[in-house]
């Protein structure tokens, strides 16, 4: 048989999914596994959204919606930006998609031409560069260490921007590091990208705000407060707790909407209908109270690990201010993070993610812990790792 398309061979597996499969296989054999690998907290979807979806389906709302999503949900999201961030957005600029991944798929198809480059911080979420490659563009990884808080900076953009660079993509809060960009920092990034656009004739700033709301040291912000020409990606998966419902959105310039509409029609017809009706209840006061309670619990988990992991010998160069991850320096223990995580899982039943999933820069000496399980299980995980690391030393 002929080989797969070249692009598919250049898209690397997401190692965390392989670790998850190994962990699940161990569970099937009767082992007790503590999951700190996948970015999915142990909370189920809040009851208001579940009830809204059930009511909608019972009322017969199970057919396709418009390709860009339910108009009333687009309006509800626009209201949310106004109420929470004081930002006025035309609902027509909001494009609903099957997960934030669907948003990035549409944006990559709409905006990236062959051999365009997508500027990304290394470490960062790996699938972003793979979306670019799917459309014959390329991810351009920029090493970003603790001194940069693992984020692109105006200086790094200026240093690494090339004639064929089209987009700079940043995340706040970020995966895997949990770092957060301030409004001043986002303003500076937007200014720098505009300068590159003036010089090279192209340049866009995309901001992944998927973990927006899961903030621990400051109030959540949006880049749209300081840069109306920036593109936003967001999701109902993380803060709103709707991972399996597969519903996200992006905010784009109004002139892009017809292209996004055409692509959405062709690529996936429409976002999932029950998920959209569920999401109509996501902004209600009772639902928001549940999210806040869960955010506080996640902060307690983070604070525990920020103390416990250094006691085990992991170094945490930058305190995560958002999301639900800790990106830790494991160089005391390994220079092969993939093997280290595999050994830890086999020996302790604790699953966490190797740095090689998130790029190349110092990836073999870093690991990511997701504090997505309850505090008692986190304490068990730390105890198991302490015993195992003591045996290895």
Image: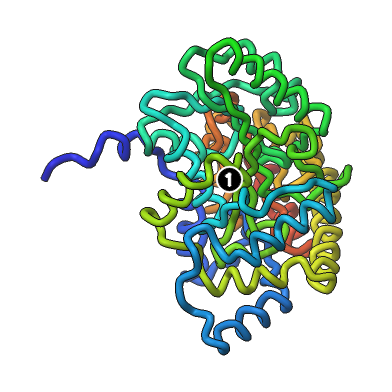
Which residue is rendered at x = 82% and y = 33% of the image? 183
**For the image shown, how many numbered marks are present on the structure?**
1
Q: Quadrant of the N terminus?
A: top left
Q: Please provide percent x and percent y for residue 102.
A: 49, 52
Q: Quadrant of the C terminus?
A: top right
Question: Would you say 99 lies left or right of 324 here?
Answer: left
Task: Identify residue for label 1.
Answer: 353
Is residue 122 in view from this perspective?
no
Which residue is rendered at x = 65% and y = 65% of the image? 73
Looking at the rendering, which quadrant does residue 286 occupy? bottom right
Which residue is rendered at x = 64% and y = 33% of the image? 170
Tag 1's secondary structure? strand
- State whether residue 384 is above or below residue 311: below
Closer to the camera in the image, 68 or 35: 68
Q: Please provide percent x and percent y for residue 318.
A: 78, 32
Q: Please provide percent x and percent y for residue 273.
A: 52, 71
Which residue is rendered at x = 60% and y = 62% of the image? 243
Is residue 90 in view from this perspective?
yes
């Amino acid at each position: 048989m002929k080989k797969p398309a070249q692009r598919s061979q250049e898209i690397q597996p997401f190692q965390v999914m392989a670790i998850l499969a190994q962990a699940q296989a161990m569970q099937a054999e009767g082992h007790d596994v503590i999951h700190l690998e996948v970015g999915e907290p142990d909370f189920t979807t809040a009851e208001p959204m579940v009830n809204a979806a059930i009511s909608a389906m019972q009322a017969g709302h199970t057919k396709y919606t418009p390709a860009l999503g339910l108009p009333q949900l687009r309006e509800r999201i626009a209201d949310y930006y106004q109420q929470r961030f004081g930002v006025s957005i035309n609902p027509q600029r909001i494009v609903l998609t099957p997960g934030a991944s669907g948003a990035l798929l549409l944006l990559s198809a709409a905006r990236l031409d062959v051999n365009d480059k997508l500027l990304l911080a290394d470490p960062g979420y790996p699938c972003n560069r793979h979306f670019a490659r799917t459309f014959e563009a390329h991810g351009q990884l920029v090493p970003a260490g603790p001194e940069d808080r693992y984020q692109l900076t105006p200086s790094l953009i200026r240093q690494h921007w090339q004639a064929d660079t089209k987009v700079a993509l940043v995340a706040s809060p970020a995966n895997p590091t949990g770092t957060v960009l301030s409004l001043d920092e986002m303003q500076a990034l937007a200014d720098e990208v505009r300068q590159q656009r003036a010089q090279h004739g192209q340049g866009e700033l995309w901001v992944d705000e998927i973990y927006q709301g899961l903030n621990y040291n400051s109030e959540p912000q949006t880049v749209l407060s300081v840069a109306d020409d920036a593109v936003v990606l967001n999701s109902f998966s993380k803060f709103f707790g709707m991972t399996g419902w597969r519903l996200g959105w992006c905010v784009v310039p109004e002139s892009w909407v017809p292209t996004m509409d055409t692509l959405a029609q062709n690529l996936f017809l429409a976002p999932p209908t029950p998920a959209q009706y569920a999401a109509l209840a996501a902004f209600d006061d009772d639902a928001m109270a549940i999210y806040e309670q869960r955010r506080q619990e996640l902060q307690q988990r983070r604070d525990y690990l920020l103390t416990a992991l250094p006691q085990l010998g992991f170094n945490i160069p930058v305190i995560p201010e958002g999301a639900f991850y800790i990106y830790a320096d494991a160089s005391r223990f390994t220079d092969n993070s993939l093997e280290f995580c595999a050994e830890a899982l086999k020996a302790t039943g604790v699953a966490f993610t190797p740095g090689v999933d998130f790029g190349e820069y110092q990836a073999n000496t870093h690991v990511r812990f997701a504090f997505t399980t309850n505090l008692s299980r986190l304490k068990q995980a730390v105890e198991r790792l302490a015993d195992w690391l003591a045996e290895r030393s």
